[in-house]
């Protein structure tokens, strides 16, 4: 029986490329990633990492602004208590979010490490 007629592949052995339903080409029978998949996988991780770094920078910025507002209020440079409370609440919320994301990532890492192969 000719299997190439069933699968639509020009040949069965080797690393022929097949477009999947999602439009991504995959190497058949070998399970290897094509160059296109490697680039997409790398760019996805890069995007996730850059997003995490940006979130940490934003959190640090809010914490710094809150600290500056506290110093200004303590030194008597400003009478506006409203700006101080807003800066403190922004910093607190951002820090809580960052800690929650970190905790979820650590839980996922621990779960992956407990998996048996």
Image (cartoon, rainbow, N blue to C red):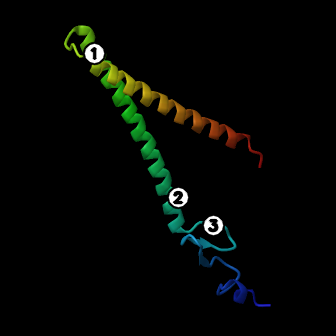
Q: CA distance from mark 1 to mark 2?
A: 48 Å
Residue visible at 42% across and 46% down? 50
Front tag of 1 and 3: 1
Q: Which mark is residue 81?
A: 1
- Which of marks 2 and 3 precedes in the sequence? 3
SS at mark 3?
loop
- Closer to the camera in the image, 64 or 84: 84
As drawn, the label of residue 32 is: 3
Residue drawn 63% across the image and 36% down it: 107
Q: Quadrant of residue 1?
A: bottom right
- Which SS class for mark 1? helix
Position of 68 with respect to 116 (left or right) is left
Earlier sequence position, callout 1 versus callout 3: 3
**Residue 54 placement (x, y as % from top left):** 39, 40
Q: Residue placed at 50% from the left, 68% from the top?
A: 36
Residue at far top of view: 75
Q: CA distance from mark 3 to mark 2?
A: 13 Å
Drawn side of residue 65 relative to residue 10, left or right: left
83 or 35, nearer to the observer: 83
How crowded pointer 2 is (Cα within 10 Å; few <14, some 14-19, many 20+) is rated as few
Q: Position of residue 20 (x, y in %)?
A: 59, 73
Instruction: Mark 1: give few (<14), some (14-19) or many (20+) Cα within 10 Å.
Output: few
């Amino acid at each position: 029986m000719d299997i190439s007629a069933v699968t639509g592949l020009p040949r069965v052995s080797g690393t022929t490329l097949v477009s999947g339903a999602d439009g991504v080409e995959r190497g058949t029978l070998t399970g290897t990633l094509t160059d296109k998949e490697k680039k997409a996988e790398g760019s996805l991780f890069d995007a996730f990492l850059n997003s995490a770094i940006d979130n940490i920078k934003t959190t640090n910025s809010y914490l710094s602004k809150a600290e500056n507002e506290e110093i200004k209020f303590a030194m008597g440079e400003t009478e506006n208590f409203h700006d101080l409370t807003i800066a403190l609440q922004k910093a607190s919320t951002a820090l809580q979010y960052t800690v929650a994301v970190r905790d979820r990532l650590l839980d996922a890492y621990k779960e992956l490490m407990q998996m048996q192969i």
